[in-house]
Amino acid sequence: ILNEKANIVDIGAVSTRPFSETVTLEEEKKRLFPVLEAIKKRFPQVILSVDTFNSSVAKEAFEYDVSIINDISGFTFDEKMSECILDCNYSCVIMHIKGKPKIMQENPMYQNLITEINEFFENAINKLLTNNFDKKKIVLDPGIGFGKTLSHNIDIIKNIESFKIFGRPILVGLSRKSFIGNILNKDVNERLFGTIGANIASYFNGARIFRVHDVAANKEALELAYQLNN
């Protein structure tokens, strides 16, 4: 990943894919911290992000030179997470989700998808800004695939500019996701080209941070898109 020139390495120890089971807090820490320790020793220059919705994990991750907390729940699964972000002065990714991973894809429904996501963002942002948090340390992720149907995911990509009302960068994490497979009829290990296409569309619609599995391929495509757009 580093050889492919990833700018940030995001590490999680709990699967949050649709229908996944959660694990105990102790198990998450047992999986995560040895990896963080190894990275800290071998690659001290890397910018580390931890994907967790547990404030206890986030608090301890600070000891491993972690810079960013990526909370898929937007501070809704653990009410102490925003407090932890403030205490440790982390940068953070606030992601939108509807429901818990185990049930979020059963029948997600919205009255107004874009409005509801922005209201979710506003609530999460306010938990930080009321305590004088630096707004520049916030990134927003509309949560493609997290309590969203195929049409919801497409609408999100088409409307990324709508999430920029808060003046913060938009992250998309759509790499290899099922909506790509549904559109192209491809298995998970055959979705690279679809991922690149969706990321390029997201870029031209306003996204600026991309969470991917295949770093080099996506980075080259996005670099070309950037050069053609500037």
Image (cartoon, rainbow, N blue to C red):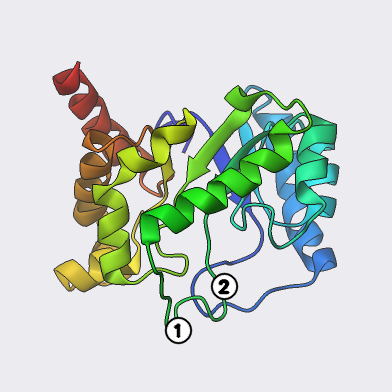
Task: Tell me where residue 75 appears, x and y as whole percent.
Answer: 69, 53
Q: Which residue is mark 2?
A: 99
Task: Tell me where residue 132 appears, x and y as whole percent.
Answer: 75, 25
Q: Nearer the viewer, residue 172 or 189?
A: 172
Picture layout, residue 167 above or below residue 59: above
First-in-chain label (1 vs 2) = 2
Determine the residue positioned at 57% across, 79% down.
102
Q: Residues within 10 Å of mark 2 (few under 14, many from 20)?
A: some
Q: Which residue is mark 1?
A: 106
Q: Nearer the viewer, residue 165 or 219?
A: 165
Side of 212 relative to 131 (left or right)? left
> Is residue 226 in view?
yes
Picture layout, residue 127 above or below residue 180: above
The image quarter containing residue 65 is: top right
Would you say the residues marked 1 and 2 are in contact, meaning their CB atoms lie under 8 Å apart? yes
| Label total for image | 2
Determine the residue positioned at 52% across, 55% down.
96
The image quarter containing residue 127 is: top right
Side of 59 relative to 66 (left or right)? right
Query: Please, what is the three-letter code of the amino acid marked with disc 2?
Result: Gly
Task: Tell me where residue 183 appears, x and y as whole percent.
Answer: 18, 68
Q: Nearer the viewer, residue 120 or 68?
A: 120
Side of 94 relative to 210 (left or right)? right
Q: Residues within 10 Å of mark 1 (few under 14, many from 20)?
A: some
Query: Please, what is the three-letter code of the amino acid marked with disc 1?
Result: Glu
Q: Residue furthest top?
A: 230
> Is residue 186 in view?
no
The image quarter containing residue 28 is: bottom right
Determine the residue positioned at 71% across, 48% down.
35
Q: Quadrant of the C terminus?
A: top left
Q: Secondary structure at mark 1?
A: loop
